[in-house]
Image (spheres, helix red, strand yellow):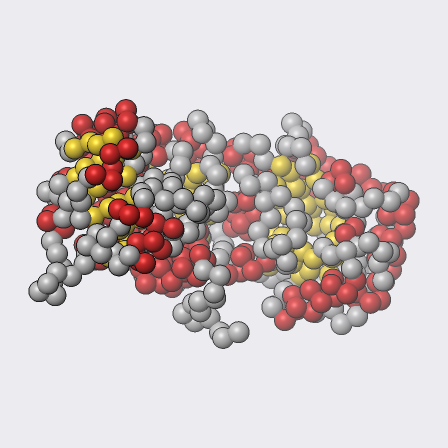
Amino acid sequence: MSPFETPVVCAVIGRTRHKMMQAELEEAGKQGAKLIELRLDFLSKPPDFKRLLEGRPCPLIATFRRPADGGQWRASEDQRFMLIRQAIVAGFDFVDLEIDIIDKIPRFGKVQRIVSYHNIQGVPDNLEEIYKQMCAADADVVKIVVTAQTPADNLRVMALLKNAPKPTVAFCMGDMGTASRVLGIRLGMPFTYGAFNKERQIAPGILSFSELHKTYSIDKINAETKVFGVIGDPIGHSLSPLIHNAAFRKLGMNAIYLPFRVPRGELASFLTGYREIPVHGYSVTIPHKEAAAKCATECDELVTKFGAANTLVATETGFHATNTDAQAALDSLRANLPLGADNQQVPLSSRKVLVLGAGGVARAIAHALHKEGVYVTVTNRSEERGAKLAEEVGCKFVNWTARHQTECGTLINCTSVGMHPNLDEMPVHQSFLNPELMVFDTIYTPETTLLIREARTRGCHCLTGVDMFVRQAGLQFEQFTGQAPPLDLMAMVVRKALSPVHIKEEGESAP
């Protein structure tokens, strides 16, 4: 029997000073926390239990974690046992006890016991046997936390949650295990853990208390929740979960969108293994776009042409692959073309375009523009790749050193020049920028690249990568759900995430 009627986020507080721990306890209560874990191993001085328990806003878990289990406790085991017993007598609601010490800490009063196992190295071969032993122990909640080395490790850990004989919390640490912290709720975990202060390094791969509520809506996840996600490596800084989950909330859909870190070469096995969840659709990013096209059982015309896909939608027989980059780029350009002398938009086909780069985005854009009858020139730092793309598209190629001598009315940057962390770089010299030029930078992190900033200074008509990013995500959302995406909301969410200035979301209360 779960200790909670509905799944909750356990806010984890780990501070070295009592004063700061008390302050975060109070603030967590104000933010609606229904369970809080105090990582007492973080304290630099012996804990003052009376001080910490006074005015508790909700049930509290007392935890003294050893370094071998990922904690900060540095003193002896005898001292740790003594403090654990004192915490129990002091009146904590829960105490976290590792499986190897439960016989040394007797049950007392109404304090509930979380019997835990942590492995910061990986997933043990005898994981299932360990779990069986833990379920047989004197535990109110069983907790297993291991470190994912492959995406398949998450599946193995989450399998423990199916038909669990006792309330069980089981997930993987590390960035490869982040999704399991949310998916476990869908499979019956009574709670998951979120760092209350996201700046504190509580555990590898842990999400923040705020993220779990605001981005992933943990309290609304149930067995019927549909699962979607983004696949990439790295994936931790992707904005896709923010905008897709915001769109699900806006439309009242019972769905969740998660980040899945999948190393290069493991996409096929990942897609096969995760069908058992099941995942209904994926956004695909670096380095898997070409592999996604090969893994699909059905491909649309653009995927066949490009040999790359950024979207996979589950079917009865496998996955249908599409590529939304080209359509998103065309839609962005059409919606943002400059006005001519007659105050009408200048036709897309009338402007010569110089495409910088020869990667996946450049390829999609060059093909799409050429199909629309636009005069396209491609340039790239690697002459071989650039010339190959130009030949494939049927357009002109110029050497990278000659790019400034190329006549164009629209400049499209599809390189990574200007992307974080190389924020002080530009793919063209500032002298190339003139008021008659339209500049489209497909980079969206940051939105205002040095290229965009300099182009605006010189009177160019500018388009940032946020517009295209939101539109390609919107096209994916429509394929995932069959519903029109709330593009304005999605754009606002992205800009809020990218801006140091807080932009209030629709429905968000004023600070």
Q: Position of residue 298 (x, y in %)?
A: 26, 34
Residue at horizontal 82%, vertical 54%?
44
Residue at horizontal 46%, vertical 71%?
508
Q: Position of residue 114 (x, y in %)?
A: 73, 50
Q: Position of residue 501 (x, y in %)?
A: 47, 65
Most distant residue in the left direction? 342
Q: Is residue 53 visible?
A: yes
Indicate left or right for 55 with 75 as reference. left
Residue at horizontal 11%, vertical 48%?
349
Task: Find residue 46 and report its image quarter.
Answer: bottom right
Q: Is residue 476 visible?
A: no
Task: Find residue 321 and report its image quarter.
Answer: top left
186 w.r.t. 158: above or below: below
Pick the residue in front: 425 or 310: 425
Q: Position of residue 149 (x, y in %)?
A: 58, 32
70 w.r.t. 50: above or below: above
Tell me how many marks there are: 0
Most distant residue in the bottom direction? 510
Residue at horizontal 12%, vertical 56%?
346
